[in-house]
Amino acid sequence: MKKVIRDYGKFLSMTSETFGAATKKHSVKCKRGCHECCANGFFDITLLDALHLRAALKKVPAAVRKRVIAKAEEQLDILEKKKAFSRKNPILKTLKDIDSVSRRSAKMSCPALENGVCLLYHHRAHICRIFGPTVRGPRRAVRLEGCGYFTRDIPESDLPILDNYEAEEKILRAMYTKAGRKRIRDIDTIIPAALTLDMEKWL
């Protein structure tokens, strides 16, 4: 599984480079200090992202790791009291599950966000790296909906998002194959769970 996580780390770095080049070319880079997408509840991430984040925690200073985990545990306590999430079953299998967590965590920020800065920025999840301006394909078809702060989009020709998803899926398939699964399971979780739980158990 370590090789899968390393390969995913390389994929994430390549994604960041492609996204960075596209946003620079079209002058649609996020403004420095903006963290609204990190401060309005939890979105879903894949189990591959969860395993990558968990492994990445070992690479950050102990003091930072302690603060991030403490905040994540506190947030999970609140969500469990609201019956919006369960540590015993941290898997989000449906859009209904995802929407429920998103709504009930709306006033929470990512546990890695501190004073407007991501403490795990270099290890952040896939969606964190590609979210921002809208990506459009032929005939103005939306490939990835942005945050709404941008008046200009990125054309798919400069950020081939469907190819990006396909590359991610190959690594997901390798992860599930390594875990003894014959097919990719369409299940997700949230960042606080990824940082505090051993999500490999749910593969």
Image: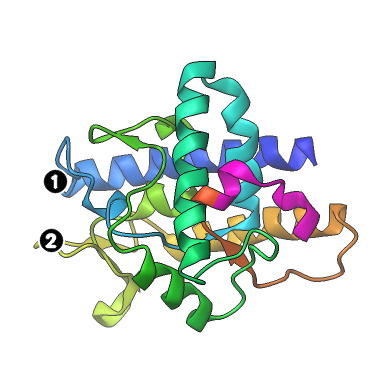
Whether residue 201 is in magenta: the answer is yes
Q: Which tag, 2 or 1, sits closer to the chain's start?
A: 1
Residue 158 in the figure: left or right of residue 115? right
SS assignment at label 1: loop
Residue 86 versus residue 54 in the image, above or below: below
Question: Quadrant location of residue 148?
Answer: bottom left
Residue 178 in the figure: left or right of residue 165? right
Q: Which residue position is annotated with label 1?
A: 27
Residue at (50% x, 80% y) in the render: 95
Residue 125 versus residue 102 in the image, above or below: above
Which of these two is toward me, 161 or 68? 68
Residue at (66% x, 47% y) in the render: 197
Secondary structure character of the magenta stretch overall: helix
Q: Quadrant of the C terminus?
A: bottom right
Which amino acid does the dot numbered 1 rest on? Answer: Ser
Q: Quadrant of the N terminus?
A: top right
Residue 22, percent across and down? 28, 47
Q: How dense is the environment of label 1, judged by Cα within 10 Å: few (below 14), some, or many (20 and up)?
A: few
Q: Which mark is residue 152?
A: 2
Residue 179 versus residue 181 in the image, above or below: above
Which amino acid does the dot numbered 2 rest on? Answer: Arg
Which of these two is toward me, 88 or 195? 88
Question: Which residues are drawn in magenta?
Answer: 193-203
Which of these two is toward me, 29 or 87? 87
Residue 38, percent across and down? 31, 50
Which of these two is toward me, 119 or 87? 87
Question: Quadrant location of residue 201?
Answer: bottom right
Query: Decide: marks 2, 1 in contact (CB < 8 A)?
Result: yes
SS assignment at label 2: loop
Residue at (70% x, 51% y) in the render: 199
Alpha-carbon span between mark 2 and mark 1: 8 Å
